[in-house]
Image (tube, grey):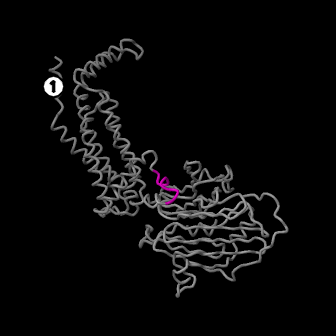
Amino acid sequence: MPTASGALSASAAKPVAAQAAAEKAVVVESPLYRVEFSNRGAVARSWQLKKYFTEEKPPRELDLVNEDAGKQIGWPFSLLLFGPQQTELANDGLYQVSAAYDAGTHPASSPQDPNHFDAPVTLTFHWSDGHLDVTKKLKFDNDYIMSAEVSVTLDGKPVPGTGLGWRGGFGDKAVYKQSAAVNVFYKLNGKLELLQYKKLGVSGNQSQPVLQPGPMEFTGVEDQFFTATFLADGTDLSLWHWTQDHSIVDDGKPASEPEAEMAAGSPLPGPVRARIYVGPKDLGRLSQVKPSLEELVQFGWTGVIAKPILFILQWLHKYIPNYGWAIIILTLVINFAMFPLKMKSWRSMQKMQKVAPEVRSIQDRYKKYSMKDPRKQKMNEEVMAIYKREGINPMGSCLPMLFQMPIWWALWRVLNGAIELRHAPWIGWIHDLSAMDPYYILPIGMTITMYLTTKMTPQASADPAQQKMLAFMPLMMGFIFFRLSSGLNLYMFTSNLVAVGQQLYLNRTDPLPSRSKFKKKNE
């Protein structure tokens, strides 16, 4: 825990004890979210996003708070203070609650429920035992961003080391089970750092918080599609991170899973102020936050290409209200736009395949010599003479493919991680383009069409071992794609179908000579 620096002044004015008579829930609601706070600890017991739903039947609004984990190890908006005793007192006290609207808006509560408030509204939680005094001021807006100010004093003097935390797990539990991709992150000195649960806490004792000093631009916790991000707002934010084990039942047997825990705050005395974004990792929304949170959508080095691809996909969805068909249209556009490059690559491979028997015969004559033998140079000269005679560039089949690789990687990033595809249906059995194909139809189709493309495409290499490896490649790719998103498999399947058609066209317009023609030519 954070440690206090120096003794607190005994002459400071002691706070007056203040606590509520009973525990109660307080609800804040907007068109985008419904948040429920408990006045016991002034913590969030539920954080529902109205535009996003669970995989249950019938689906429910997604709750970013794991209730079971919260009961066991702590809740979002709990405090991390300078000592374990003070932390426990602050997170268990019954806080007095007051609400305030901006002037000229609407009444302070619903007539039906005095503890239900519509955003924008400011809630103030206050508790004191006569020594430790805590105030949390939370301002909710209609957007996903809110602001928080936390003041903690002991015997009237501000204490060092106050952190406002997100505890008890985070995000979509279905995604967590699939990928275990719940990370703590921070941006310091212009660099975003991701910390998986294995890197949290003290090595050898991960339940012990570790202080990562700031000042940070932002810090928080995330899963594949959602984030709770604390942004500096007048306080130089630092980060505490650790893990706690959450007891579960797995296949009827007692087990546990680690939950990423974090708190944003300052090791110095004084109030902690932050803006907090709790919502989807939607690139458009994240780009509007200051500072921008776009980096939380992990496009990596492909971002320059991936972002335009995502914007094009979103634009297509305006006119084709089904992301599956939008992916197919996008695939067709990309494949036909890249067809001249593919044609150049395939023509080069065709030429190389035409001379492959001749090249192989030369290689066979020199295979008894070692690589260090000067006569191997003669072999290379003879092969290059054939390439020159036929007008073949040995790199002609590779360069177009290398040019296409960044586009393929960018598509991989977009189709495997864009929140727009979460729970987006296509047809029939595909109800979620961000999840695996439940019946593996698309990855199997992708494997078959990739195999057909490989068999139809001229092989640039004359080496039989390399040709066997290329023939085995579709099976390897299919094995990998079985666990990837339906959206990515749909792209690959469509792309392979187009490739089969394009290869049929190329083979018919410029077919390879038969082996008999080659034999006559060399007689």
Asked if the stretch drawn in magenta spans residue 125, the answer is no
* Up-down relation of residue 408 to residue 155 (above or below): above
Q: Residue at x 23, y 33 (%)?
A: 347
Which residue has dot 1 on it? 516
- Residue 184 locus on image (x, y percent): 57, 55
In the picture, measured across the screen, residue 117 lies left or right of residue 57, that is right
Outermost residue to the top: 374
* Residue 462: quadrant of the picture: top left
* Residue 433: quadrant of the picture: bottom left
Q: Depth check: 205 or 473 in front? A: 205
Q: Split into 4 quadrants, where in the image is the N terminus? A: bottom right
Q: Main secondary structure of the magenta part?
A: loop
- Residue 62 locus on image (x, y percent): 48, 69
User: Taking the image as drawn, is residue 1 in sight?
Assistant: no
- Residue range in magenta is 289-298
In the picture, measured across the screen, residue 104 lies left or right of residue 399, that is right
User: Taking the image as drawn, is residue 115 in sight?
Assistant: yes
- Residue 110 locus on image (x, y percent): 53, 84
* Residue 83: quadrant of the picture: bottom right
